[in-house]
Image (tube, grey):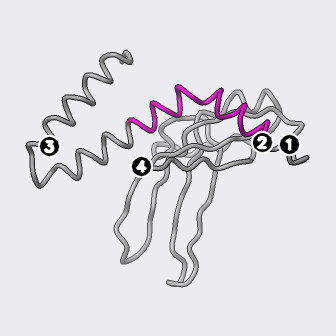
C-alpha cells in the first residue's frame, strides 16, 4: 500500500471514527498504532543516528551494527485483558544478523500476580504472532517511547 493511500485511509478512519461515538476510542487507537508504525519506518534512520550520537557522547557507544525497527507488543496474563501496541527499538549485533531483523517482539506477561515480565526478541518478521523466529546474535540496545 502506498503512503498516500495509507494517509487517505487513516484520515477516512479518523473522520468516520469521530461520527461513530462508542467506537471512536477503538478507531483512534488503531489510527495511533498505524501512525506510529509508519513514523517508525519513516524516521528509523534518523532515530538510529540520534541514539548512536547520544551514546557516543556518553562514551557508551556500541561497536556493532545498529538499526531501529518497530516493537510489536502482545500482552498476556490471567485475569488481565490482552492488548497489542506498537513502538520502536534499536537493535545491535553483527551486520549480517541485524539486516535480518524486521521487528522486536515484546511479550508481556504477569507471573504470580507480582512480577511483570517483558521479553524483547529481535525477529525476522513483521508478523511474529504467526511464527516467532528469533534472530540469533542480535540484542535490543534502546527502547524508543512515543508520546501520544
Is residue 29 left or right of 15 when viewed as pictured? right
Pointers 2 and 1 in contact (C-beta within 8 Å): yes
Q: Which badge, 4 or 2, is on the more N-terminal residue?
A: 2
- Numbered badge on residue 148: 4
Q: Give coordinates of residue 26: x percent, y percent.
A: 23, 50
Q: Give coordinates of residue 12: x percent, y percent.
A: 19, 29
Q: Give coordinates of residue 59: x percent, y percent.
A: 91, 46
Q: Which badge, 1 or 3, is on the more N-terminal residue?
A: 3
Give the labeled residue for mark 3.
18
Name which quarter of the figure residue 65 lies in.
Answer: top right
49 magenta-colored:
yes
37 magenta-colored:
yes
Q: Which residue is drawn at 62% across and 41% down?
A: 123
Give the labeled residue for mark 2.
54
Give the labeled residue for mark 1.
57
Pointers 4 and 2 in contact (C-beta within 8 Å): no
- Front-most of residues 134 and 65: 65
Q: Which badge, 3 or 2, is on the more N-terminal residue?
A: 3
- Numbered badge on residue 84: none
Is residue 4 left or right of 42 when viewed as pictured? left
Kind of element beneath mark 2: helix
Is residue 49 left or right of 14 when viewed as pictured? right
Amino acid at each position: 500500500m502506498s503512503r498516500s493511500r495509507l494517509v487517505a485511509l487513516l484520515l477516512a478512519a479518523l473522520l468516520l471514527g469521530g461520527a461513530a461515538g462508542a467506537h471512536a476510542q477503538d478507531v483512534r487507537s488503531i489510527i495511533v498504532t498505524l501512525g506510529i508504525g509508519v513514523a517508525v519506518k519513516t524516521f528509523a534512520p534518523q532515530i538510529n543516528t540520534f541514539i548512536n550520537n547520544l551514546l557516543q557522547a556518553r562514551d557508551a557507544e556500541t561497536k556493532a551494527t545498529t538499526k531501529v525497527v518497530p516493537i510489536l507488543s502482545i500482552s498476556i496474563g490471567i485475569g488481565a485483558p490482552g492488548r497489542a501496541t506498537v513502538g520502536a527499538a534499536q537493535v545491535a549485533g553483527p551486520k549480517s544478523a541485524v539486516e535480518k531483523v524486521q521487528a522486536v517482539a515484546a511479550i508481556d506477561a504477569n507471573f504470580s500476580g507480582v512480577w511483570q515480565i517483558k521479553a524483547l526478541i529481535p525477529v525476522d518478521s513483521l508478523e511474529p504472532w504467526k511464527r516467532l523466529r528469533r534472530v540469533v546474535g542480535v540484542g535490543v540496545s534502546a527502547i524508543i517511547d512515543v508520546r501520544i
